[in-house]
Amino acid sequence: MNVGKTSLLHRYMDRTFKDTISTVGGAFFLKQWGPYHISIWDTAGREQFHGLGSMYCRGAAAVILTYDVTSWQSLAELEERFLSLTDTAHHDCIYAIVGNKADLTDTNAQLAQDSDGHSGDSDSLERTDEQVLSACPTPPASPVSLSGLMPHKQVTHEDAVALYGRILRYKGLEETSSLPAEKMCFETSAKTGYNVDTLFETLFDLVLPSILRKRNENQGCTVNLEDSRGGGGSKRSRSGCC
Amino acid sequence: MLSLHRDWDDIMEKEDHQQGEEQEVKICDSSSETLATSLSLLGNHMFPDSVQRNDSSDSQLSDLAAAVEPCLKSEPSDHVTRRENEGPENGVPTQPADTEPEDADVENEQSDSGDFVAEMLAKAKLEEQGIGLKGRSSPLLEAGNDESPALMSHRDEDVTAESWRQHRKHVFVLSEAGKPIYSRYGSEEALSSTMGVMMALVSFVQSGDNVIRSVYSDGHTVVFLQKGPLVLVCVSSSRQSEQQLRGELLYVYYQIISMLTQASISRIFEHKKNYDLRRLLAGSEKILDGLLNLVDSDPSFLLAAVHCLPLTCSLRDSLSQILQKAITPNLVFSILIAKNQLLTIVQEKTVIEDTRLEPADVHLLLNLIGASSAFQAGEIWTPICLPLFNPDCYFYAYISYLDPPDCTVCLLLLSTDKEAFYAVAECKRKIEEAMVTQKSLSLIAKAQSYSVSQVGVSDLRHFMYKPFDVPDHYRQLSQFTSPEMEAPYSSEEEKMRLLDLYRYMHSRIHSTSRPLKLIYHVAERETLLAWVTSKFELYTCFSPLVTKACAITAITKLLRWIKKEEDRLFIRYPAKYSTTPNPSKSSRGAKSDQQDSTDNGFLSLL
């Protein structure tokens, strides 16, 4: 908890960074994505609410596991406490590992992307994409060079990549047939907006085709909740840790 | 037949020596129809003991509080009285010996424990000097706090600072092992030694087979409440009665129960006596902070009644019908709220047979809604326990605003089924649709609290009326009605001052040792009259120059007006629905959910 799950979603949905309070239970949001509604659960990180975990994750198409780049413990807790909550997710659910609060450790992330201004919004999105694509194949570059300047950083990109590998093993998935770690490990800043749109939009693009495929296969057999809400969409869960 | 008291307090005001008048009337015969007839039966009785003079205090309330205190203190050996010099704590030097003459006896009897208390507290203060702001480096602090001072919360306060001591009301929660759980101001870590002393006091008195209830010092009242493995302590300079403060601590306890359930708290401490409950409550501090702010500013808590938004009967009925039609299995309560006031409440049938929703439970729900409104566009789903309904089980609350982005109209649906989110969310969509069709939202938007001028009684500035005679065959929720606080009570300070006067009147009416039926109180800037009968409880505030006869006529008129407006001011006939063909499922379903609470992550921690 306190890794910034609500702030991330707030940044993505409302384009703002506000003082949030500790999430009570879970909060459910619908995001319009083209002709579809994407259901998003913003979950509480507090132990008090872990009992609800199985409900949020049931049938989820994607889970965003969020940690705080300045807290090693937050990454460790993802594995210790939160991973088991995702057991009810759909069997081909995809997992993203997100290190939030990157602005505290990474000068790139400190550059506020003016996501509030509509003009130039697409520009900044493209720029973000490039950053991710160039940064990910050479993970040591940014974190290591900066770690001297920013003593806060406790979790490196490699740590996240390693966790991703362990999650695949926990889920019994083959690394070769799964999405590569480079693509699924993000560092974001809800405060500046760094990488936030990239994160959500990458995931939406990844899960939507498989959901639509499934829906076509199942057509007429089952009525699922997404259908009744018009348009069909993916249900997503986000989990995080303290 | 009538026992009558009347005392005249000549109250010396700080500078202007304005004269005040204090009159108490105890009427045993409450069947009298009007106040006028009741008052005509009055006789006079001087009450020498309670006449006190206080030259240094800032309001007449101190006098009156001093008069009340001896009564409360009369329970033998239940009180430890503290009288050590608190130094600059109070700012204004007072003469305790003058204000509490009757305490001398109690004092002598308790001198040993009094010294002990003084010593312990002095020691604690010394220790804290060294601790200071240790808690600031807590990893629990949210990022960004250090950069924006606006986000700096009470939690970061320096507990050694004078400003910390000067807070009007401190509330502390600790475990029986003396572990800090919550402090309203300052971080719990920095206060651990103070809390240790509090626990030492509790244990000290307990070792003599007794229970510590309160400690009085010149400026402060310290009230203790022990509930299971939790100890709650309030340190107040608000001059509220011990009973009222204890009631407020009970709300804090209930709010904690509402988040964790009584059963799991007991279980946790049975397994591990020195468990750090903050682990489970981390993040909930703001809910407790919010509750304590509400308790101070909202008279609903004092009156133990809920405040309804005035609505025409037909609109309220149509809203109830909308809620009645949008149901799903295991749904037990549907509640509609606007501007933090109740619009309507609909209950599952069998729940009504079993029990009813208590005002305190509604207050906790309203506080939860207020505290979770930071991100209002979403639909919230959270376990919540209603401690007075059943302290050991969870309900699952669905909370959603119906009018984003304004977020004034809030729908609250309570289910006993943890998995029912999607079904309950579907109910909300039905309710939303029906409200669009009937244009309910625009009608609700027009509804507002009323002005006292609508009553049409000159000199009447404000009132609070709590009826006991709402049709009772439904076991109705206690409600009260009250107009907006308008000038001269529009500023926060003045609002608080009026509420303090009401709290004082309330403490006199509900005094355990000498309860009153009627009290007429001339204060410095207003005149108040409180009256309790078998049918209602009423607190009124008039302009200062009103005569007694005027006030009586005004109250008669006010009661007539309320009678006429009753249907609009209160929820008259609570609607109900049946969500399950099997009647054993609803409320007993809630109880079976008790097992489920073990599933909520608690035992796995131990």
Image (cartoon, helix red, strand yellow):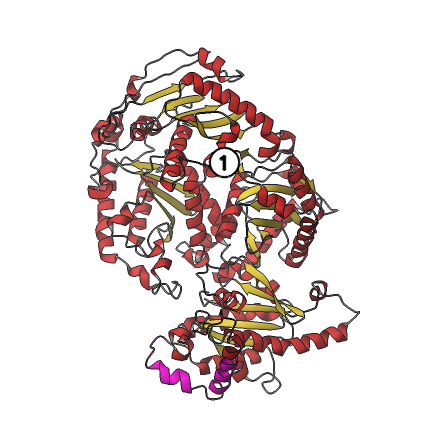
Provide residue B183's location: percent of width, then percent of height: 36, 50
Chief SS of the magenta region: helix
In the image, residue B280 sits, relative to residue A198, either above or below, namely above
Residue B433 rendering spot, x and y as whole percentages: 69, 52
Whether residue B349 is visible here, answered yes or no, is: no
The residue labelled by disc 1 is: B304
Quadrant of the image occupied by residue B131: bottom left
The mark tally for this picture is 1
Q: Quadrant of the C terminus of chain A?
A: bottom left
For residue A108, side relative to residue A45 (left or right): left
Q: Pick out the residue farthest to the front.
A: A119
In this rendering, the answer to whether A111 lies above or below B255 is below
**Residues rendered magenta in the picture:** A126-152
* The magenta stretch spans residue B529: no
Q: Is residue A62 above or below residue B264?
A: below
Question: B457 or B320, which lies in front?
Answer: B457
- Judged left or right of residue B160, residue A145 is right
Secondary element at tag 1? loop
Between A9 and B487, the one nearer to me in the picture: B487
Q: Nearer the viewer, residue B403 or B143?
A: B403
Q: Is residue A199 above or below residue B277?
A: below
Q: Residue at x 58, y 68 (%)?
A: A237
Q: Position of residue B312 (x, y in %)?
A: 63, 36
The residue drawn where x is 20% and y is 39% is B85
Say if residue A63 shows up in the picture.
Answer: yes
